[in-house]
Structure formats: structure tokens, C-alpha cells
Amino acid sequence: MSTPLMPSSPKPVSKIWRPGLTHLPVLTPGRRLFRRILKLLCRVVVFACTRMTITGLENYPRYTPALVVINHLGDPDAVLLLAALPDFPEMIGKIELRDIPVLRLLAGLIGVIWVHRGQPDRGAISAVLEAFRHGRKTIIAPEGRESVSGALEVGADGAAFLALKSGVLVVPVTMTGSEFRRIENNLKKMRRTPVTIRVGQPFVLSLNGRRQDTLQEGTRIIMESLARQLPPEYRGVYA
């Protein structure tokens, strides 16, 4: 067993606790339509603002449930992923975003799984597992937040728990160049920002041993799968 890595700064903990708001979104006809429209809009925005390169899309499972794990560089990540991926995976959002009126409205239209960070959130876990049972995919950032440094931080055990509990495929998807400040600065100069998205080879976590050791090992495997797809300057503590 490798020595546990120490985080560079404490992970955020939600001060808001509203478990009644956490559930799997129902895919009503209206919500399905809005998701299609939003996906199209994301593609238009990404084309206008970036020069996106996608590799490994053949690795993305089309018709099976999966846990899509990502490195999280900034707010543009969600737009890039919706533009790049062939479907519309369920998205997990921190509960604090619901207090922003525009985001609350948008989240209500597309459907979001709200999560309370820094503590076990049984409602969010149940919602993701239910999504898998319905054949849906879910995107999660194993670091538990947007990276402070822009490189990989120590992963939390949530993604590994979901992967081990469900047995679904884990699909590592990495992004480079999607930092908000970089895109914003280029837009001021009327330039499109080069960004890359890489879809890695899916795998299944299947480990034996003590629960805590298994979660730590699963987290290490997930985070190193992301690190292998990233340039050295993005690998952070997994360099």
C-alpha cells in the first residue's frame, strides 16, 4: 500500500444542509428536449470560443451505465464536456450553487444531483446508484472541487466508493486548457483557446481487502488513470 498523499489545502465542507433537494432528476419529455437544446448551445459556444481537440472518443461507452471521472479545472469544464460527449450524463453540483438564482433555474430545467461536500451524503450516493440502475452515466470530479493549482489534487474516496458499490465502468476523461482565466484572457484578444479532451480506456474497480484500504487503493487507481492522460504540469500530486 502506498503512503497516503497529503492535500495542499483543506477540502471544502458545505455549510448548507438540504438533503430533501438531493434526488435523481426525472427525465420528463420537457427535460429531455431542454437537454438537447442545451447540448447544441454548448457546441456553438465551444466552437466560437475554443479550438477543441478530442481524442479517444471511441473508448466512450454508448449504451451502458458508467462513472465518468474528470479533472476539474474550472467552470468551462461542464460546457466542454456537454459539447464533446455523445450523450448527456447526469451532473453533480454543489448545493451552494442552488442559491444563485440563474443557476437554480438552469439546474431545475436540466436536472442536477445536488451534493453536500465534505461529509457523507447518502442522498447523493443513492441518486447516483439509482442513475446506474436506470442505465445512465454520471460525471464526477474525484478531487471534490475545482483544482486550486490547476493540477491534480489528492482525490477523495467518493468516486471509488461509487465504482466499487455499483460495479459500473469507470471512464477517465481529462481536460487541458479549460481554465476560465485562460479562456477569458484569450477572448479579450479575440482568440480561440486551444483545449483538449481525452477519453481514456474504461475499467472496472474490483478490489479485495479492508474497506478503508480498498477505498484508498481505488482512489489511487482512479487518480492515476487521470494523471497518465495529462501532461506533466497537470499531474500535480500524482506526478
Image (tube, helix red, strand yellow):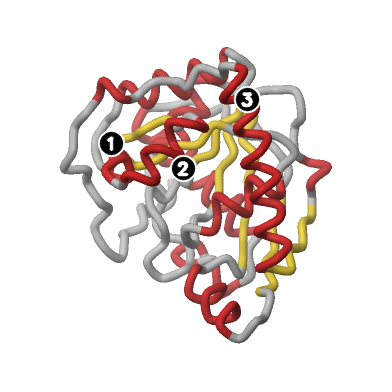
**Residue 202 percent coordinates (x, y):** 70, 38
Residue placed most toward the observer, 236 or 144: 144
Cα distance in 3D space between marks 3 and 2: 33 Å
**Residue 98 percent coordinates (x, y):** 31, 40
**Residue 17 percent coordinates (x, y):** 19, 32
Q: Is residue 3 above or below residue 221?
A: below
> Is there a contact, CB below 8 Å, between mark 3 and mark 2?
no
Q: Is residue 198 left or right of residue 233?
A: right
Q: Circle 3 sits in a helix, a strand or a loop, which is it? A: helix
Q: Is residue 39 left or right of residue 133?
A: right
The mark found on residue 176 in the picture is: none
Q: Is residue 210 above or below residue 42?
A: above
Q: Which residue is mark 1?
A: 116
Q: Which residue is mark 2?
A: 219
Q: Residues within 10 Å of mark 2 (few under 14, many from 20)?
A: many
Q: Which residue is mark 3?
A: 32
Q: Circle 1 sits in a helix, a strand or a loop, which is it? A: loop
**Residue 201 percent coordinates (x, y):** 73, 43
> Is there a contact, CB below 8 Å, between mark 3 and mark 1?
no
Q: Residues within 10 Å of mark 1 (few under 14, many from 20)?
A: many
Residue placed most toward the observer, 141 or 30: 30
Mark earlier in primary sequence (2, 1): 1
Q: Circle 2 sits in a helix, a strand or a loop, which is it? A: helix
Q: Residues within 10 Å of mark 3 (few under 14, many from 20)?
A: some
Q: Is residue 175 left or right of residue 149?
A: right
In the rendered structure, which amino acid carries the disc numbered 3? Arg
In the displayed orientation, state which residue is furthest to the bottom.
Answer: 189
Cα distance in 3D space between marks 2 and 1: 19 Å
In the rendered structure, which amino acid carries the disc numbered 2? Thr
